[in-house]
Amino acid sequence: MKLIFSEDRERLYRWIVDQLEEVIDGNPSPLIGLATGATFEPVYQRLIPAIKDRDLSGLHTVNLDEYYPIQRNAPQSFYSYMRSRVFEPLGLDSRQTLVLNGETSDPKCACQAFEAYIRERNGIDLQLLGIGRNGHIGFNEPSHVFEMETHLTQLSDVTIKDNLRYFKSKDSMPLHALTMGIGTIMSAKSIVLLAVGESKKSALQALISGKITPQLPASILKLHPDCTVLIDALAGEDLDWSLGTRI
Ligand code: PGA
């Protein structure tokens, strides 16, 4: 796991946009794994102008996760997030993008179809990840096991608390989600995790100095051969920056 630190978030955003451009330019039919959350909004804002004039007809994307149950067009759905921030601005059509379906009556089948979509495209070339305060990646919450395949899961109390701000009340917030599994994330050819802001400090500390444990799902990334963790000054305040590269 490579660490990149910067006092200037802009450099981290640019670094990720450069990686995405490299994958898109280097492969006629890339499959990119996208993430949602506040962390990635600035990345997508910079990505759109950088790539919108390219021929993106060979590009496919999958998303890490989606609330369950949720109407696809609800403003809080990750589908709505992606449609307005990425799919529509880039003119990607619905066959090019896959977000797990929060409306399905058969979550198991949706998860299997999701895995098949990735397999048929020879795997994910680059997977973007955020990290939760509790160390979750996607909606793989702290647990006693790493759940390898894409699955239906229960949101943890920490995640419910953190994401409640997007909903009117706890009663209107889905308490479950569909998430790409840990094994599926780990099978991506390369992974980029972005952590910004003070709230990520303790998860990063545990990731970097702790052991590999399903209690901190992100810790599995230490076993990935090509994973880069990008950290801003606030998230990296208590970390030893000499362990990584400063940009
Ligand atoms: P955030 O979410 O970008 O909104 O902090 C990250 C995550 O929960 O993975």
Image: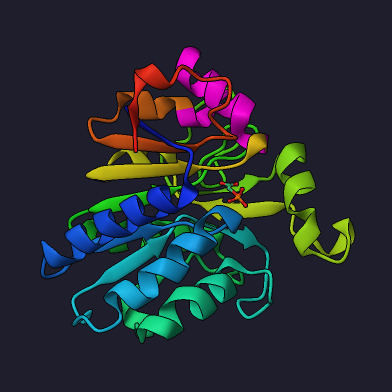
Does 162 sit above or below residue 91?
A: above
The stretch of residues the image draws in magenta is: 199-218
Give the position of the C terminus as an image quadrant. top left
In this view of the protein, which residue sits in the foreground, 188 or 36? Answer: 36
Give the position of the N terminus as an image quadrant. top left
Residue 206 in percent (x, y) is at 55, 19
- Look at 32% across and 59% down and name the residue there: 17
- Tell me where residue 91 sits by quadrant: bottom left
Q: Is residue 79 visible?
A: yes
- Look at 61% across and 35% down and name the residue there: 200
Helix, strand or loop: magenta stretch: helix
- Tell me where residue 59 sits by quadrant: bottom left
In this view of the protein, which residue sits in the foreground, 247 or 157? Answer: 247
Assess whether residue 63 is covered by the magenta stretch: no
- Look at 55% across and 42% down and name the residue there: 196
Residue 42 in percent (x, y) is at 50, 62
- Look at 57% across and 32% down and name the residue there: 135
Q: Is residue 214 visible?
A: no
Residue 170 in percent (x, y) is at 86, 56
Q: Is residue 234 left or right of residue 223?
A: right
Snapshot colouring: rainbow
Residue 158 in percent (x, y) is at 74, 38
In this view of the protein, which residue sits in the foreground, 68 or 221? Answer: 221
Q: How many marks?
A: 0
